Image: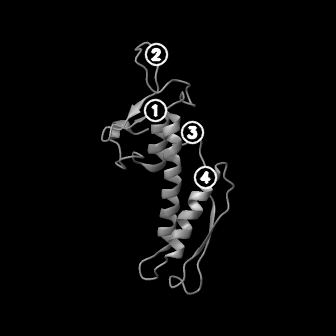
Amino acid sequence: MKTQEVTFDFKAKLPENYPMSPPTIELLSELAEESMEEKMKASLKTLLTNWNPNASYLIDAFNALSKAIFEVSVISCIICHKIPCVTCGNVLDSPDPNVETCKAECPYCNRVYHKHCWDQTIASFGKCGFCLRPPPADMMP
């Protein structure tokens, strides 16, 4: 999804009466993409505002953050299809068989990726970013 490794650092504080009160979670990393930061904050705010001490857990907050990161990355992926692979410089696809391409396709949903994006997505998430199925062993990076 991304063409470079990105690490997100967070600071989570559990109140003394957790889980009766929600945790506080702070993003420590500075992000180049403002939209990603806004999406993560909105996801957290929704979850923490609707905190249910009988059904909410800290892991839910991190799952919401992960989903927000993923959704922003999907938008980047759609844009990425219009440009050559940033790793190798090859186009995603070409009708000309003499043009070298950088293409991988999910065998389940047939979603097309740059091969390098596919490898990074599988290495990071372990599954296709669209159908959320793990690839067969022969498609692992």
In this rendering, the label closer to the viewer, 4 or 1: 4
Q: Which of marks 1 and 2 is nearer the N terminus?
A: 2
- Image disc number at residue 99: 2
Give yes or no for contact between labels 1 and 2 (Cβ–Cβ under 8 Å).
no
Q: Mark 3 points at which residue?
A: 3
Task: From the viewer's side, name the closer residue of 89 and 44.
Answer: 44
The amino acid sitting under disc 1 is Lys
At horizontal 46% and vertical 32% (from top left) the residue drawn is: 115
20 vs 29, left or right, is left
- 10 shown above or below 114: below
Q: Name the residue under label 4.
A: 35
The amino acid sitting under disc 2 is Val
The alpha-carbon separation of the residues under discs 4 and 1 comes to: 26 Å
In this rendering, the label closer to the viewer, 3 or 4: 4
The alpha-carbon separation of the residues under discs 3 and 1 comes to: 11 Å
- 95 shown above or below 30: above
Give yes or no for contact between labels 4 and 1 (Cβ–Cβ under 8 Å).
no
Q: Mark 1 points at which residue?
A: 115
- What is the number of callouts on the image? 4
At horizontal 51% and vertical 30% (from top left) the residue drawn is: 82
The amino acid sitting under disc 3 is Thr
Q: Which of marks 2 and 4 is nearer the N terminus?
A: 4
At horizontal 53% and vertical 54% (from top left) the residue drawn is: 69
Q: Which quadrant holds the C terminus?
A: top left
Q: Earlier in the sequence, mark 3 or mark 1?
A: 3
- 79 shown above or below 51: above
Element class at badge 2: loop
Element class at badge 1: helix
136 vs 89, left or right, is left
At horizontal 46% and vertical 82% (from top left) the residue drawn is: 53
The alpha-carbon separation of the residues under discs 2 and 4 comes to: 35 Å
Percent position (x, y) of residue 7?
61, 53
